[in-house]
Amino acid sequence: MAVFESYGYVVGEMTPSETREKGVIISRQLVDDESSEMIVMDEPDEYARATLPVHFGAGLFAGLIHGLGSTFFEWHPNNLPKFGIINTFHHSVAHSLLFGTYEGTKRIIIHQVHSFDDEANYYGAAYLTAFGLAGGIAGQIQHVASHYTEQWLGLSDSTLRLSMRSAAAPTLRPVLLAFPSSAIGFVAFEYGKKFTT
C-alpha cells in the first residue's frame, strides 16, 4: 500500500497544476505519437496527464520507500549499510520499471482502443482489458529486471557481482506467473482511484 501511495503522491505533485482540471485533452506528447489525434478521456486524472518520465521517477521513489522499509524489517547488524543500499537500489529500479512500463503500455493500448471506438467508457470492458494487459506486462518486466538485479547486486548470495555474464536467465514459469497478479493489482489500482479522488 505504501508503494502505491508514494507513487501516487509523486505523480500528483509532479503533474503541472494547470493540467489538473477536468476535461483536459491528452496530447500527442503523452502517447509519443506525432501523427495521433488528440484523445479526450471520460475521466481524466493526474496519472493520465503526467508525462512518462514522471511515472518512471515516481516509480523510482516508490521503490526507494519500499527498499528502505524492507531494509528496516530485514536488516542484519553485520551488513546493514551494504544491504540497505543494495536493497534500496534494487527496489528502486524494479518499481521504476513497473510503474513506467505500466503507464506507457496502458497509453499505447488505450490509444488503440480509441482508434476503434471513440465512445469507449473509462470503466468499461475495453479499459478493464487495457489495464489488465498493461499491468501484466509491467509485472513481467519488473520480475525479469528484479531477477537480474538480485543476481547482479548479489542479493541472492551476499556477494556483489558486477558482471551480467554470470547471471542466469529467469525461468519461464515465474515470469508467466507474474502476469496475473500484477494485472489484478493494476486493475484494482485503476478502479480504486475512483474512490480515493
Image: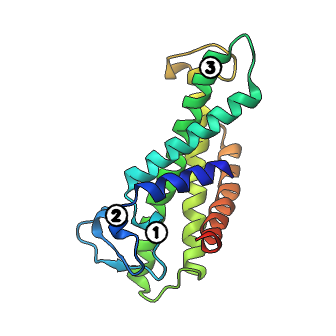
Quarter assignment of residue 94: top right
Q: Give the mark, 1 or 3, whose residue is nearer the N terminus.
A: 1
Of residues 145 and 76, the one nearer the viewer is 76
| Local secondary structure at mark 1 | helix
The picture places residue 123, in percent across and down from the top left corner, at 59, 80
Separation of disc 2 and disc 1 at Cα? 13 Å
N-terminal of the pair, mark 2 or mark 1, is 2
Residue lying at the far top in this picture: please name it: 78
Q: Amino acid at mark 3?
A: Gly
> For mark 3, what is the residue?
154
Residue type, label 1: Ile
Rendered residue at 54%/70% (across/down):
130
Give the class, few, some or many, for how many residues have Cα within 10 Å of label 1's Cα (few <14, many ≥20): many
Q: Would you place residue 105 above or below residue 97 in this image?
A: below
The residue where tag 2 is placed is: 30
Q: Residue at x 69, y 23 (%)?
A: 156
> Which image quadrant is residue 92 in?
top right
Q: Is residue 110 left or right of residue 142?
A: left
Q: Where residue 196 sits: x, y (%)? A: 63, 69
